[in-house]
Image (tube, grey):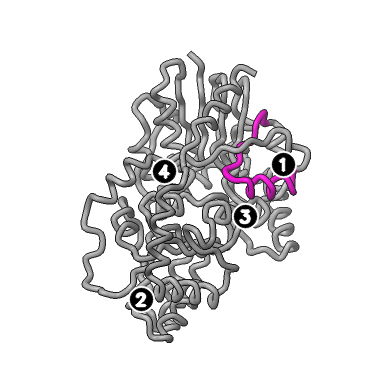
Amino acid sequence: MKKLLFVINTMGRAGAEKALVELLRKLSSMEKYELFLYSIIPCGELFKSVPEKVQILNKRTYECSVTSVRGRLIIICKIVQAFFYKLTGFRQIRYLLGNIKEQKASGRKLQYDKLFWRLLAEGRAGLSDTYDLAVAYIEGASTYFLADKVKAGKKAAFVHIDYERAGYTPFMDRDCYGKMDRIYVVSKGVEEKFCNTYPEYRKKVRLFRNLLNKDEIIEMANIGTGFTDDFDGIRLVTVGRLHYQKGYDVAVEALAKITKDGYNVRWYVIGEGPERVRLEKLIKKYGLESSFILMGRKDNPYPYVKQADIYVHASRYEGKSIAIEEAQILGKAIVASDCTGNSEQIVSGHDGVLFPLNAENIANEIKWLIDNPAIRAKYEKNTKGKKLEYPEDIDDMLALINT
């Protein structure tokens, strides 16, 4: 049997992790592959969704959310352990300071989480076994770890994000992609941004679109009650972690404009993250405590999406949004920012609306869809017919073993 290893940063309830679980499900039905999973931080709700056939290599796993108090403590513990593992942290001080300097010089928002990915990858023992194919399923620590601490006949790495906007750089990566035989991107826009930074690896790049279990999503959308309040206006829903990338600060300002114009609207956000405190202050500033609702994590967000009048995805950048694809499966009209990934998922004027990201645009597009229910119904009908499954992508990955 061929031995396939997948490495991921965490197993939290996020897009890449969901897609990985679905890939493992499909591969576990094939008898000729022995499957292994290793998580850099062995924490996340999706460990319980990993197929039984997959061997989890972490000695211990934690099925709590990475954004919970316990999850954050586990992450801190793993960072401290990595820092003192063979004095890795002391050896990386120059690297960390160099990355901080580079990010500040670029004018980008400093993203401390990415600075620790290299520490988490290097501050641990490598895997002793050898694999026919090893895959780093996301950027950062899993890719660094796979490049330097995994033995495999073939190696591949996934890129799920707008590489330029996300804050990754060649200095941060230390040319880990040079050690890969194949680099999979989830959208053409991601490919373009990645190859702008690494033109020398263009021939290694292939498209591998996100995997989703359509039947399961529809089934879960029919489980549970969803909204239990007695609100009778227009419900907007967004699913995604509370992070600067997701543009919730712009969304709050947009809702202030919508309500000022007399529309009876509530905006529900399903997800948790580091921006909660800042967003709560912003919500209070605009007096939107009863209409911009931070719902936190939901094990099953699908009933809420199904019951939404409009799904909104106003992110600053994406790779390819699984949340949008899930909303499409549930037949929602979508209002989304025109950025990498989103622009490939929505045909503006056919199954949704794309707009340049600012509060005025968001407000105008939402009000237009509220005022035109027939257009909204057309979008809902068209979005259900989208192609979201690409089995040929899996075939390309498995063919890599024999090349």
Callout 4: few (<14), some (14-19), or many (20+) C-alpha neighbours within 10 Å? many
Q: Residues within 10 Å of mark 3 (few under 14, many from 20)?
A: some
Q: Residue at x 57, y 19 (%)?
A: 132
Label 2: which secondary element: strand
Question: Mark 3 and mark 2: span between their CA atoms?
Answer: 32 Å
Does 6 sit left or right of 191 as displayed? left
**252 sits to left or right of 307:** right
Identify which residue, 3 or 111, lies in the foreground.
3
Query: Badge 3 is on which residue?
Result: 166
| Cβ atoms under marks 3 and 4 closer than 8 Å | no
Along the line of sight, the residue nearer the viewer: 234 or 167: 234
Q: Earlier along the polypeptide chain: callout 1 or callout 2?
A: 1
Contact (Cβ within 8 Å) of mark 3 with mark 1: no
Is residue 202 shown above or below 241?
above
Taking the image as shown, residue 77 lies to the left or right of residue 293, namely right
* Label 1 vs label 2, nearer the camera: 2
From the top left corner, tell me how far across and down residue 367 is, in percent: 44, 76
How far apart, in angstroms, are the residues tagged by discs 1 and 2? 48 Å
**Closer to us: 254 or 168:** 254
Q: Nearer the viewer, mark 4 or mark 2?
A: 2
Residue sticking out furthest to the right: 200
Which residue is tagged 1?
A: 174
The residues tagged by marks 3 and 4 sit, at their Cα atoms, a distance apart of: 23 Å
Q: Earlier in the sequence, mark 3 or mark 4?
A: 4
